[in-house]
Amino acid sequence: MDVPLICYDCGNTATLAVGARCDCGEPYWVATDPKGFAWPESGERSLWRYRDLLPDADPTGLAAGAGGTPLVRTPRLDDDIGARVHAKVEGSNPTGTFKDRGSAVGVAAAADAGYETVGTVSHGNMARSMAAHAASAGLDCLVLVPADAPAERLSLLARHDPTILRVEGDYGRLYDESLRVGRERGIAFVNSDTPLRVAGQKTTALEIAESFAPSVPDAVVLPVSSGGHGSAVWKAFQELREAGLATELPRLYFVQTAACGPIAEAWERGDRTATPVDGGETVAYSIANADPPSGNRVLAAARATGGGVIAVDDDAILDARRALSTDAGLFVESASATALAGAHRLAERGAFEGDDDVVLIATGTGFTERDVDAPAVDAATVELGALDDAVSERMD
Ligand SMILES: *Cc1c(COP(=O)(O)O)cnc(C)c1O
Ligand SMILES: [Zn+2]
């Protein structure tokens, strides 16, 4: 594919046929020319609304249904955060996470370029998303998972019938090896921070920005793992600035789990590069990447926008997950709840002002989650004849 690429760090250019990473070691993103871009007048609600900022691709099937998710006010969270809080509900995507945005663009572009097989390295949401989009487009899908991937997660993935291969060895290296194998065998790998995925995932931020147009929110808070989505959000706001649709960029705050937070640790040290960590167990397993391929790019995004990177522990994540359910009506994955947990910590540090608009990206639904911390159910049983008394006893 000769999609034009540019390195965010050194400015080198290339095309996708050559590879996803620059010689300097940093990831490429798709080069775009946003000058002249205006908010579309079309009524199209999916991410293809922004096709002028996306690689050429003709979406069929499920791809046409990705994006267009609700941005809701969550007024009952305002007091705790000390700002006007909004949530971007990415659980409304076809497979329940923002990953569908990257998969939609990646699979559509691969199909357009004549690929018959797509692939990914993941055993979670990205794998399910790729397998679903490939199924819809009629492409074969190869999913490479770590040898110890839990069976109950693979069974959700298997519903879409991809070819699953368990791979022993270093998971970080598998990422690079998959790209090489893909190039040599004509399989389009759409991994966590590869250029087509990041291009599609820009649309989370484009939708947020269009909701606030002509202004922009003051801050956006989102969970990060590989750093692909965080990079995409940064890129989207840069493009809007180039197009003259955003004078200022929102402060971008990235949240990791304390059990596995290499980007947050680098930020705390004041480093420009993230180094791999020995990740531990965490309820936020979807964001436990010990060696994030776009870690440095996320650090650059936090510096450039006056934001930051922080880590939160499992207790704070579960508290936030509960608050999202009881005070905002949102049923999210633990990994997604880190956004609110992070916003709490940022608020304690004085990051927000009372009239700030703060957007939390609720990255994925909780419906697919292994049941951690299920609350005991408090429900009495009453005779039908005693219904009136029972209701008045409890509800008056
Ligand atoms: C993948 C994922 C993330 C992290 O996204 P990256 O692009 O890997 O940083 C966050 N939340 C959920 C629910 C995810 O599935
Ligand atoms: Zn470079």
Image: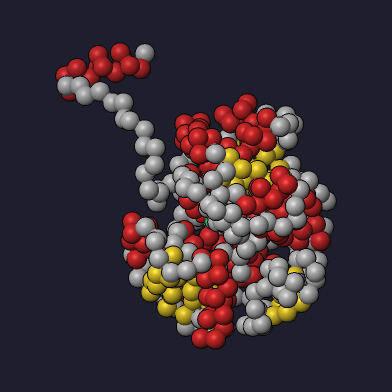
Left or right: 323, with 20 as reference point: left
The vertical placement of 310 against 386, above or below, is below
The residue positioned 71% from the left and 32% from the top of the image is 349
Query: Ligand 1: which quarter?
Result: bottom right
Q: Position of residue 253 (x, y in %)?
A: 68, 45
The residue positioned 63% from the left and 26% from the top of the image is 79
Residue 351 visible in this rendered orientation of the protein: yes
Closest to the observer, 281 or 73: 281
Q: Position of residue 68 (x, y in %)?
A: 56, 55
The residue positioned 68% from the left and 68% from the top of the image is 27
Left or right: 12, with 362 as reference point: right
Closest to the observer, 179 or 68: 179
Question: In the picture, residue 238 is in which quadrant?
Answer: bottom right
Q: Quadrant of the C terminus?
A: top left
The vertical placement of 128 against 318, above or below, is below
Closest to the observer, 141 or 178: 178
The vertical placement of 138 against 395, above or below, is below
Q: Position of residue 265 (x, y in %)?
A: 66, 47
Left or right: 305, with 342 as reference point: right
Residue 45 visible in this rendered orientation of the protein: no
